Image: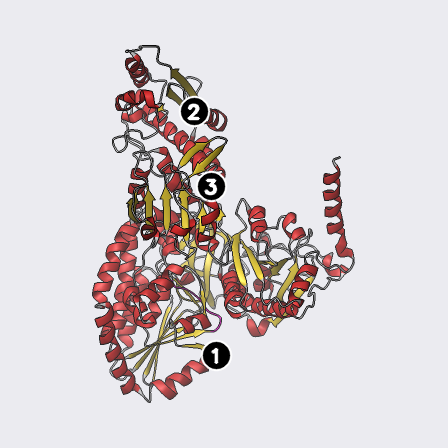
Amino acid sequence: MHSSNAIRLLNRRLFRNCYSKRFVHPAWPTLEREIKNGRQSLDILFIVTSHNTMSQKALCLLSSTLQCRVMVELHSNEKLVERVQMHKPDLIICPFLTRSIPNQIYRDYITLIVHPGPVGDRGRHSVDRWVLERPKEWGVTILEAVEEMDAGPVWAEEKLDTEQHLPQTATKGDAYNILTTLAMKGLREIYHKIFLGHYPGVEQPASVKSLPLNTLKQRDCAIDWSSDSASTIARKIQSRDSQPGLLDSLCNIPLYLFGAHVQPLNKSIHTPPKTILAKDKNAFLLSCADSTSALWITHLKNALDKKNPFKLPAAQVLPSTPTLLQNYLSFEDIHVDVEDDVCYVQWDFYNGAMRDDHCYRLKQAIRQNINASVKVVVLLGGLRYFSNGIDLNTIEASDNPVEQSQKYIHAINDLIRYLMMDLSDKIIVSVLRGHAGAGGAMMPLVGDFIFIHENSIINAHYRTMGLFGSEYWTFNLPSRLGSVAQANSLVNHLQPMNAQQAVTSGFADFTYSAWNEVQEKITNDILPNLSEHLKWKAHKRQENITKFGHPEACRHREIKIMNDNFASFEYNRARYQFVRKIPANTTPFHLLSVGSKQATMMKGQTCAAHIYNEIKSKYEPNDRNVPALGCLLAGSKPESELYVRMKEKSLREKVNFKTHIVQLQPGENDNLFGLKLERVIREWNADPNIHGILVQLPFPEHLKQYQSGVLKLIHPEKDIDGLLYPNSSFVPCAAQAIIWLLDWYDVKLNGKNVVVVGSSKLVGEPVSLLCKARGATVTICSIHTQDLREAFSHADIIITATGSPHLIHGDLLPENRSLVIVDAGVSHDPPHIRGDVHMDSVRDKCILITPPVGAVGPVTIAALAHNLFQAYLAQEKLSSGNHLEHTHTNTLQYMI
């Protein structure tokens, strides 16, 4: 065995065994020394399964309150170890992670697991068991990652009394919320211990470490309909809500059950358990073993439905149900109470998602309860969510997602318009008791006063879903913050806010911890000073209309943009992935910008591998006919010969496609050379066994006179490199590769300012059109543009393809560090290959950048394989007598 390998293996064994005695992580002494020398903050990396409420709340706490530099990486990132080594954090925190951490990471870096259970509890189903079994005491443990799951030294432990903190009706999602707040106490405690110079890790007792993993199988919470009461069944469902749901069946269909609510009955019923008693507002009421109560189920997921493998309103999953025995009971998800001069409005829509019927019922409920005596309307939303905007699941399952999206956004806008315009003589108070996101975060802005609970998280942005947004945000948000610039900055920041940040920014007015604080403000300030508040409201409204335009004009402009968004690839892809819980292949762009000191290098190999796998999943090899490429080389040009060999090798090794290479050299005084080139193209056009034609460009200088004549002869159905674009059936591969690479890194083009340097027919021109089609504003420059610095000053994305080495250097770029740079320009300076961008000088000016080799190139060849496969499928249809349906190849639907 090589000596270095032997040492590495010995180190691993020592690390694995060292927890049998008191152990301090090898990285601690360096951190301790730096703190003693005056260091004031920590560099912290979050590794998360998804950037959810827990990690968002921790991000806000550590970065804003405790002034740490916080970075975020998704566990699903295929380059996770490499990314960790790039960040070099002092501390890694893994909040409620559902997967194990590679041992190379926790060996080299202090890695803490935030576990949603007390010391000794282990495994993935801790919260499920807490909700199902309700032990007297529960808690959160923050412990060091070691090889054995949840067995490392404990850095912090926080406990709570179940009866006091976990309501009987709490779901698994509610329980996570409670434990998230508890975890913040633990993280704060660890922070202070570190800066006191104390190593916080305390070894777990051997008796605790030997406990088995805490798993919860389906049989542990299966419903026994013959004996379980409604409350017992509700708790079982709540222990699996919101994920993965509780598997059962209705009407002989296997279904996952969600949204359980016990319904007391006025009179006993004597029907078999699991009978559907009533249907109301898309929910089903089921009989249970006890005759005095029944159970509402609001949402279902069909275990056999591959088209819609996500939860939907119950009546939508089972539209044809048996005749109902009685239908006089109603499901109440909206509650309006009028007390003295105040109207309190609560709604509890599943996960805060709002459909058009929700909005219209909510508006009607308020209207029916409002009278002249009501002076103040208090909007309370739900306990867990105020609102999360439009219901993406039901949009995804609809026959026409574009029309359904439009219907929903108009409904929520109509509700907001009613609150703004029709109730202008009332004081509106918005109280965020829970979290809010997207349009649901803009909805409370109708409030004249906004209260936010100290544990709430606000995501006041839309662009991660590929949307501009509506809900009158372009009027209400600038009115709140004071300027359009501040509103745009908040919306485009794509980051969460905690309650204190919301108040500091002007988004909200007050934070509160207990309901009586809100009531006291209403009773002691708002009601006694009502006339002054109404005068102030009218004055501010007119002032804001003068500054920002009329609200209806703002809505009209929003809807015009949103209509384009709803039809866009980005929205449809983002929605598709969101509702199906498809994890990202790499850490999304908006998270890369959080706390990172240096640019992330975009790598094309994993993106290309994904494209090849997609092709192979749809390709059935045929001995008679396989996809085949005809590749023509004119003359001798070493770099062209190299590129052709790379393409042939990739097509053969990755997808087993054939390549026929013809290289022609002109003879002395060869007046027929052009005809020879043209003859090759004509033969390939007519050959049914050649499905795609590629002419390697550029021709050597002395042969360029033949280039255009040869290209014009390629049949559009075989022009897989898009050489005749826009008259080809295919988009040029390099341009398509750039878009796919941006998709891979989750860079949304909608609403972005894109500067394209170079206007070639194969890259610059088509990539400009593709960016515009995605909703970007595109500026086209060239190597002759007088002031590139001015062109780049407002750029979000720069795409360059000129072949001019180091054309773009750092002093041309703005200092905002939010740039994405794609360098598709290649020039040969043997032995070097150089790009258009001077890498060393721009690296600290951007978030994402492509190196000149290994990014656009591999994806370009994969795009060539994709186009060749599409051409093969189309030509096979023709040869079999089927009508040829042109396949648009500018995107693989939801592929990346």
Nearer to us in this view, 128 or 287? 128
Magenta-drawn segment? 454-460
The residue tagged 3 is 851
Nearer to us in this view, 841 or 858? 841
> Earlier along the polypeptide chain: callout 1 or callout 3?
1
> What is the three-letter code of the residue carrying label 2?
Val
Q: Residues within 10 Å of mark 2 (few under 14, many from 20)?
A: some
Q: Residues within 10 Å of mark 1 (few under 14, many from 20)?
A: few
Q: Mark 1 and mark 2: span between their CA atoms?
A: 70 Å
Q: Mark 1 and mark 3: span between their CA atoms?
A: 53 Å
Q: Mark 2 and mark 3: span between their CA atoms?
A: 21 Å
The residue tagged 1 is 514
Question: In the rendered structure, are the residues bearing label 2 and label 3 in contact, judged by CB atoms less than 8 Å apart?
Answer: no
> Earlier along the polypeptide chain: callout 2 or callout 3?
2
**In this image, 81 relative to 746: left or right?**
right
> What is the three-letter code of the residue carrying label 1?
Ala
